[in-house]
Amino acid sequence: MKVLSIQLNHVRNLKNQEIIISSPIQVFYGKNGQGKTSILEAIYFAATGLSFRTKHSSEMIRYTKNTLSCSLGYQDQFSKKSLSVSIENEKKQFFFLGKKISQMEFYGNLNVIYYIPEDVMLINGSPSVRRLFMDREISQINVFYLQQLKKFSHLLKIRNKYLKEKLYQNEEFLIYEKEFVECGSYLIEQRNHYLQLMSSFIKNIYQDLFDKEKELQLQYKTFIEFQNDVTLSKIQEEFWKEIKKKKEKEIQYGFSMVGPHKDEFIFLLERQDAKLYASQGEKKSIIFSLKLSEIDILSKNKKEMPIVLIDDVTSYFDEERCHSVLQYLYEKKVQVFITSTERLKIEADYYRIEKGEVYENTSS
Ligand SMILES: Nc1ncnc2c1ncn2[C@@H]1O[C@H](COP(=O)(O)OP(=O)(O)OP(=O)(O)O)[C@@H](O)[C@H]1O
């Protein structure tokens, strides 16, 4: 997929403008605080309806305004298309080819992978950060997963409420609990499947791009030990067993202690937990390998290449590594959007950003 244009309306400090895109690699450069990250955020928002900086995307609305919209013109293997998201009265609206559609229909039309300095939290942060990341990635290739995720989060709230109010012998509770186990088991099955796929890619990417000597693995931890593939019914069976074991404690504490909301994903470098033992540089390379693995997964599943956003590229890579990473993306025919505080020594289309204004494109 290739983005052809970006239309901005009241996004953070960015001037309302249309930016025409025509190259595989674009570099947005400028001093600090000029609006570089906001451009990438706007692209991500127009493609997904989400921000990679905040859970509350209404924070993206310019201080003095109360509405916002971002649109993308893009081309997939078939034709030119457009996506647009707006926020009005705190409500998001989604458009495809100018027609209003639901968020479910919207998500996954244009796949985007981003890499921002805060991503190191994927290793250093809490398990919920990693779960959120995995959930977003799986949802990009599987809309049914996204639906089940929403359903599970709803069921979890209900189940916790019943537990807290000691209504666990109620007939309704048993119906909700059955759904809770079925829905949760599906999420676990899909996470395991996705993790297996991802593990095989990240190991090779890490060795090819960053360190031939070291082995990177990604481990999925849930209440069941996975040897290869486990059937959905086996997961359900184990889920029930675990619930039975923990029921007394659940009643005592008033919340659900078993399920995919407790899952953990662990990065192992040379079989050691990267969170504890990897260097800062290694952590950046691990995250980058993880992000690059999404390209292979998405292209395998969707038969389309995602677009890649890299914020503040020189803070992760020296010039040589920057070249090899971009060469890798170029060979995969992935369109890339990069921000940097200065022009880079790579062939790209350059856009200077000053006080929220994007100045005409100059090729190197
Ligand atoms: N909702 C908003 N409305 C208006 N301006 C905003 C809003 N949110 C943030 N800003 C401002 O927008 C400016 C641009 O921020 P942005 O993070 O895009 O800059 P940047 O060029 O990526 O900077 P850096 O290189 O320091 O990361 C900042 O000065 C910020 O204070």
Image (cartoon, grey):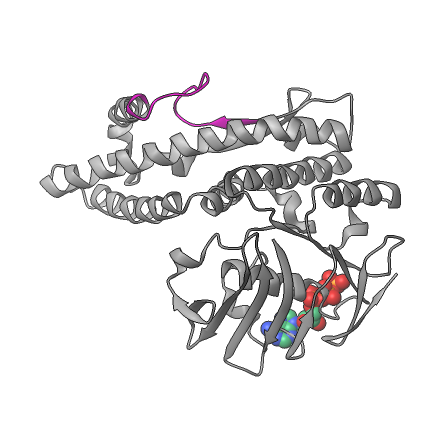
Residue lying furthest left in this view? 171
Image spot of residue 149 (x, y percent): 37, 45
Magenta range: 218-234
Instruction: Tell which of 223 and 36 is nearer to you.
Output: 36
Q: Is residue 241 visible?
A: yes
Image spot of residue 359 (x, y percent): 78, 74
Vertical arrangement, residue 79 with respect to residue 170, above or below: below
Q: Is residue 168 visible?
A: no
User: Position of 11 compared to 246: left or right?
Assistant: right
User: Position of 348 compared to 35: left or right?
Assistant: right
Vertical arrangement, residue 31 with respect to residue 107, above or below: below
Residue lying furthest bottom in this view? 64
Instruction: Tell which of 181 and 44 is nearer to you.
Output: 44
User: Position of 271 compared to 163: left or right?
Assistant: right
The magenta stretch spans residue 277 = no
Image spot of residue 14 (x, y percent): 67, 75
Image spot of residue 246 (x, y percent): 29, 27
Instruction: Tell which of 208 and 221 is nearer to you.
Output: 208
User: Position of 1 compared to 223: left or right?
Assistant: right
Q: Residue at x 61, y 46 (%)?
A: 305
* Quadrant observed for ligand 1 in the rendered image: bottom right
Quadrant of image for the C terminus: bottom right
Q: Quadrant of residue 176?
A: top left
Instruction: Tell which of 239 and 358 is nearer to you.
Output: 358
Q: Residue at x 57, y 52 (%)?
A: 77
The magenta stretch spans residue 223 = yes
Residue lying furthest top in this view? 227
